Amino acid sequence: MLGRLNHVAIAVRDIAAASNLYRGTLGAQVSEPEALEEHGVTVVFITLPNTKIELLEPLGADSPIAKFLERNPDGGIHHVCYEVDDILAARDRLVNSGARVLGSSEPKTGAHGKPVLFLHPKDFNGTLIELEQA
Amino acid sequence: MLGRLNHVAIAVRDIAAASNLYRGTLGAQVSEPEALEEHGVTVVFITLPNTKIELLEPLGADSPIAKFLERNPDGGIHHVCYEVDDILAARDRLVNSGARVLGSSEPKTGAHGKPVLFLHPKDFNGTLIELEQA
């Protein structure tokens, strides 16, 4: 079921400083920041040869990463995103196995304009997993 | 400087249970556990089309992931590993920019038999970064 690792998401307090760090110190290819108001984050994409890293900075009052940054003031790895061919089939397989899908269990449109679901970290070794229909 | 994402490492309490979860519920290709006594972990490799996930369970009294699991009892994403062409050149670039390398700053032989370094999470948005010479 699991396909490619689409991205690793890292929550940061200051996306300009983090971009400079990845571009300058680490010598990576880093995009300009993009404000995704409907997702409550500003995002920067770091393109690696085989996948990408997404830096996320909270945007607005109800950002989904605000609590994570309260618990992790320096920032940290927030989630991993795996691609699946069929997100509804993936959801049904997961729910049938007893795993919890966050929210309503209906896929939402993710930051890349594709259907996504998030899985409960308690059911996956403390790891927040996003599934994205490729 | 940064090359491929070599792997994402996830610390787990019970590698047999975590392997079953990834193999069964998530439908991934999961290796048999391998005890790496000199690294203080038992490791399982999950092969994705473009990279791999490594599940790590503490092994022995001085496991480098023991404290992480004390702080994160459910487990969690422990580090990301980026490939570099020349680990000594990477280290010198990092040190010259003021970033801290963990330990003696001399590369050690990592779990894949290649030279590795770890960078201080405080200098990289709370993210533990491993660099591996590809």
Image: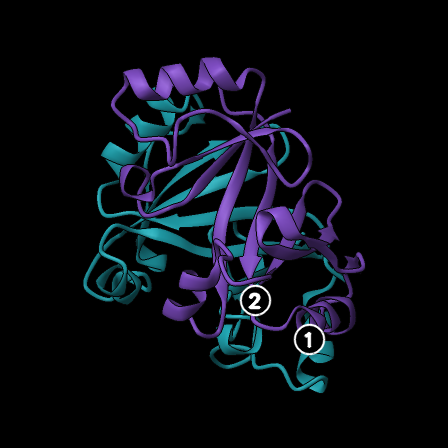
Chain colours: A cyan, B purple
* Residue A21 spot, x, y in % from top left: 31, 28
Drawn side of residue B134 relative to residue B96, left or right: right
Q: Are marks 2 and 1 in contact (CB under 8 Å)?
A: yes
Q: Give the mark count.
A: 2
Q: Residue B4, relative to residue B22: is it above or below? A: above
- Does residue A36 appear anywhere in the picture? no
Tell me the distance, in whole angstroms, between the alpha carbons under discs 2 and 1: 9 Å
* Residue visible at 55% across and 70% down in the picture: A125
The residue type indicated by label 2 comes to Val
Please tell me which residue is depicted at 68% across the width and 66% down the height of the picture.
A87
The image quarter containing residue B111 is top right
Q: Which mark is residue B12?
A: 2
Question: What residue appears at the point 19 percent right and 64 percent down from the top-left corner?
Answer: A61
Residue A107 falls left or right of residue A30: right
Local SS, label 1 = helix
Image mark 2: chain: B
Seen from the viewer's position, the closer of residues A28 and B111 is B111
Image location of residue B13, percent across then percent down = 56, 71
User: What crowding class fits label 1: few (fewer than 14 Cα within 10 Å), some (14-19), or many (20 or more)?
Assistant: few
Instruction: Kindly indicate whether the residues beneath marks 2 and 1 are on one polypeptide chain.
Output: yes
- First in residue order: circle 2 vs circle 1: 2
Report if residue B111 is visible in the image. Answer: yes
Q: Is residue B6 above or below residue A118?
A: above
Estimate how packed mark 2 is, as few (under 14), some (14 to 19) or many (20 or more) residues with alpha carbons within 10 Å: many
**Residue in the foreground of this view, choosing between A41 and B37:** B37
Q: Chain of mark 1?
A: B
Residue at the spot 27% in from the left edge and 43% down from the top edge? B122
Does B76 sit above or below residue A42? below
The residue tagged with tag 2: helix, strand or loop?
loop
**What percent of the width, then of the height, locates residue B55?**
63, 58
